Image (spheres, rainbow, N blue to C red):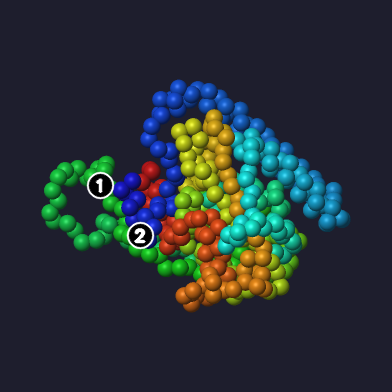
Amino acid sequence: MEKFSAYIDPGTGIKPFLTPVPPVGSELLARATLPLRFILGIVRTLLSLVLLSVYLILIPCVRLVLFPIPPLRRSVEHLVTFIYGRTALFVIGLFWITEEQVTRKRGRGQRRNESWNPKAGDIIVSNWASWIEVVWLALRFNPIFVLPIPEALPEPPTSARSSTPITHTPGRRTGTGSANIQPPARTTEARIPILGFQEVSLLTMIKMTGHVPAFGPGGPGSFPKSLEEIRKNASRPVVVFPECTTSNGRGLLRFANVFNQNVPVKHYQVFVMCVRYDPPTVLAPTLTLPIPSDTWNPIGHLFTLTKSLSPAQMSVRLLAPSESPSSQLFMANEVLSDYSGQDQLSETCAALIAQIGKMKRTGMGWEEKSNFLGFFRGKSR
């Protein structure tokens, strides 16, 4: 993996964009069970696709029939999403999902769980590592999903080929294979402003998992809307992924300035959560999807998961609302010590998610991942 050394976070040593792999060993067991796992994967994948097809047919029917009664329509839509979403997660091996409400400070006595029930116009903020949490959020809260629209796309990194030529090159010089691997120079990409957001469907959000923001005002879909405009007109909670793309779950990517909001937040509630996945094993692949498929994303990842013989493990940690950035008792100076940027809410959410999820924050964001994907696909050809 030396060719990806330019995409190692210098502060933590984490490679946040590479797909986690299981430790070396027990390959014999994996090979022995390959025929069984292949058959199991085909059956479970087909069943998942059947569930998706029925869901995509049923939801428009519900919206059409119950269009005159919006509250009933949303309730029935949520019920259908819950049934099919939870069944789909069960099929791929998520038999149980651990939900835990946590606080920043552990007290001596046991605290009673607070109501974690986002309403219309509230904001749910989470890290993003897979399409699994997108499905979980949909079945749990039936929210509105949004994708960020950047002002521009990152500039391609300066190639090592354009650097000063090396005249003394001992060893082989074949010009091919590992002898010619030239990773891009390690540089920190400039942060690109987020112009606004675009509301998308659950299916679109799943398909976009792993990708980086690539829409502009002239791109597919509508012109960007401000998050405040979307929130004010929302009939459901709004989910925001400030990382703007997925990591491999081993570290938290740099949050973009998606809120431009001071804390504590007024007029609406902010719910902060963190999703964690277990490391992969030989018989249980990673649930994270940092690198998307070029076509039919994420069907390839789905097949990888359905081949697993071991149950999948996922945990969700929910920050108590009394300690969220929208609580009027929230003390910003306890989280924002030396911050002088424009988006206190984004920085606060990053610090809180890292704390409740026990994750390290990296200095890399979606801009670096955009260049990583270009480099990765170039090397894969």
Q: Report x, y in % for residue 153.
A: 47, 63
Marks 2/1 in contact by CB < 8 Å: the verdict is no
- SS class of the residue under badge 1? helix
Q: Report x, y in % for residue 374.
A: 41, 53
Estimate how packed mark 1 is, as few (under 14), some (14 to 19) or many (20 or more) residues with alpha carbons within 10 Å. few
Mark whose residue sits in front, 2 or 1: 2
User: What type is the residue that disc 1 sits on?
Assistant: Asn
Residue marked by disc 1: 180
Which residue corresponds to the image point at 72% horizontal and 65% vertical from the top-left? 121
Q: CA distance from mark 2 to mark 1?
A: 24 Å
Which residue corresponds to the image point at 35% horizontal and 50% vertical from the top-left? 4
- Taking the image as shown, residue 309 lies to the left or right of residue 187, namely right
Residue marked by disc 2: 10
User: What type is the residue that disc 2 sits on?
Assistant: Pro
- Residue that protrudes farthest toward the front in the picture: 108
Label located before the other in sequence (2 or 1): 2
